[in-house]
């Protein structure tokens, strides 16, 4: 299935494919316009009460509850241990515990239904305390006076189930359109039949929209059941919504291509094919600039330099008006490059970040994070964001209101994913001793 490929970094892994269902699905018809002006999302009714922020005492009990059960819809625990419990509808049993030499804080998250100007009273073994939800602002925790910073109360968002339970849902994409509407797309998988180890099923691209980003309507499938991998959403200069997804049209070939459907305000278009290489194209992302140009970036396998073996490259196409430009190779390297992200600034420049498995200096190859800009048809230089013996990968990029470019990434330890060999002297087994292992003192890793 597609989900099995998400964490594997090998061209061979993309040969895996899900069996395609033989069931026919009804093609979605026209969508009606949403009536009324967009409305603001309702304020979150979630409040997180954290215990043990300062007095980190093993065995200290913070059991308690809400004095008025009618004020609570539900209670969730946060960082609770096996000995802790939530007692519906309004109580909890929590005891701080030492783990790994540290006593971590624990919390409960209250989903309140009472008016926000109505005080909420919490009882605990150490005494009662109260708070008024309307007085707690987002990002500004309230510290009840008696506890001197050992207890905090903060407003938090509560998760909302958008997709339902009919499918196994994965890889969502979210878009806020310029008219204030929200669009949500995702990959939905369903097993249709099992016969021993033989599974018949498939996944589809689903899409929904709403006025406030809180409630979702018109959930429809955009594709027939098949083998799909990830989805991205973008809005062009004409206000059309582009839903771009990866699909393997010929099962077990390993060749994923990128396809799109476009919503013009009334109907979804026929499917458009955006890539046509016989090698896989995937891990796509899309961003639009203030003029409505779309920048589609992805990772695709292409022949290596001088016709060598295929390697992964970072590629891009730009939609300007109604025309998609030619494919642009952003990485232009002799190494394998992975999982790009893209964002635009106010000037219309696109910024693309990715990670590259490359040799830097005299050491073995590692994953490094790179960044490149694209403006007015020209590529900027490839800039190194982070290059150490650690594994820096899965980059993301954003541009803030001051046009500053921010790049984030995951960091793995030394020798992440490397074959470091195997030795068993007792049985005289020595397989690639040391492999490509890196052993450096901490002073050399800075």
Image: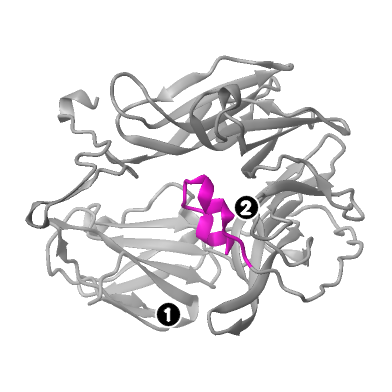
Is residue 352 visible in the rendered image? The answer is: yes
On screen, 226 above or below 284? below
Instruction: Name the residue nearer the viewer: 18 or 82.
Output: 18
Is residue 232 visible in the rendered image? The answer is: no
What residue is shown at x 73% (from left), y 67% (from top)? Answer: 225
The circle on residue 213 is none
Q: Secondary structure at mark 2?
A: loop
Instruction: Name the residue nearer the viewer: 170 or 278.
Output: 278
> Could you say where residue 419 lies in the image, as x and y percent from the top left?
30, 44
Residue 110 falls within the magenta-colored stretch: no
What residue is shown at x 44% (from left), y 81% (from top)? Answer: 69
> Could you say where residue 123 lies in the image, as x and y percent from the top left?
30, 74
> Could you say where residue 201 lies in the image, as x and y percent from the top left?
66, 73
What residue is shown at x 68% (from left), y 23% (from top)? Answer: 346
Marks 2 and 1, how far apart at CA: 58 Å
**Nearer the observer, disc 2 or disc 1?**
2
Q: Which residue is mark 2?
A: 254
- Residue stretch in magenta: 1-18
Instruction: Name the residue nearer the viewer: 436 or 206.
Output: 436
Residue 415: name its quadrant. top left
Q: Which residue is mark 1?
A: 68
Instruction: Name the residue nearer the viewer: 189 or 91.
Output: 189
In this image, 324 relative to 227: left or right? right
Q: Secondary structure at mark 1?
A: loop
What residue is shown at x 52% (from left), y 63% (from top)? Answer: 158
> Could you say where residue 256 lies in the image, as x and y percent from the top left?
67, 49
Q: Residues within 10 Å of mark 1 (few under 14, many from 20)?
A: few
């Amino acid at each position: 299935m597609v989900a099995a490929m998400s964490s594997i970094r090998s061209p061979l892994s993309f040969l895996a494919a899900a069996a395609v269902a033989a069931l026919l699905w009804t093609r979605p018809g026209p969508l009606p316009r949403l009536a009324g002006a967009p409305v603001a999302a309702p304020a979150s009714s979630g409040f997180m009460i954290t215990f043990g922020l300062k007095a980190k005492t093993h065995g200290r009990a913070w059991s308690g509850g809400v004095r008025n059960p009618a004020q609570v819809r539900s209670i969730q625990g946060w960082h609770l241990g096996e000995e802790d419990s939530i007692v519906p509808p309004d109580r909890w049993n929590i005891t701080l515990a030492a783990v790994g030499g540290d006593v971590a804080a624990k919390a409960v998250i209250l989903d309140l239904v009472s008016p926000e100007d109505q005080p909420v009273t919490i009882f605990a073994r150490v005494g009662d305390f109260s708070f008024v939800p309307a007085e707690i602002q987002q990002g500004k925790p309230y510290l009840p006076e008696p506890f001197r910073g050992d207890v905090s109360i903060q407003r938090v968002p509560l998760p909302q189930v958008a997709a339902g339970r009919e499918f196994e849902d994965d890889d969502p994409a979210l878009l806020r359109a310029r008219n204030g509407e929200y669009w949500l797309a995702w990959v939905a998988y369903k097993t249709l039949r099992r016969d021993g180890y033989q599974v018949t099923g498939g996944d589809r691209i689903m899409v929904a929209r709403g006025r406030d980003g809180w409630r979702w309507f018109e959930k429809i499938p955009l594709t027939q059941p098949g083998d799909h991998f990830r989805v991205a959403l973008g809005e062009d200069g004409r206000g059309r919504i582009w839903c771009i997804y990866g699909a393997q049209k010929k099962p077990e070939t390993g060749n994923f291509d990128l396809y799109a459907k476009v919503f013009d305000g009334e109907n979804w278009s026929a499917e458009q094919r955006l890539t046509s290489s016989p090698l896989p194209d995937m891990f796509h992302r899309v961003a639009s600039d203030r003029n409505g140009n779309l920048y589609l970036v992805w990772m695709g396998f292409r022949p290596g330099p001088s016709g060598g073996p295929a390697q992964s490259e970072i590629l891009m196409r730009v939609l300007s008006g109604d025309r998609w430009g030619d494919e642009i190779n952003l990485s232009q390297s002799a190494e394998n490059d992975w999982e790009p992200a893209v964002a635009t600034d106010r000037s219309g420049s696109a910024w693309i970040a990715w990670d590259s498995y490359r040799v830097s200096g005299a050491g073995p190859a590692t994953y490094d994070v790179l960044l490149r800009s694209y403006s007015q048809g020209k590529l900027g230089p490839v800039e190194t964001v982070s290059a150490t013996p650690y594994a820096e990968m899965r980059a993301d990029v954003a541009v803030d209101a001051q046009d500053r470019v921010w790049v984030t990434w995951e960091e793995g330890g030394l020798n992440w994913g490397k074959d470091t060999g195997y030795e068993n002297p007792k049985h005289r087994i020595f397989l690639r001793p040391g492999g490509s292992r890196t052993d450096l003192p901490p002073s050399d890793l800075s």
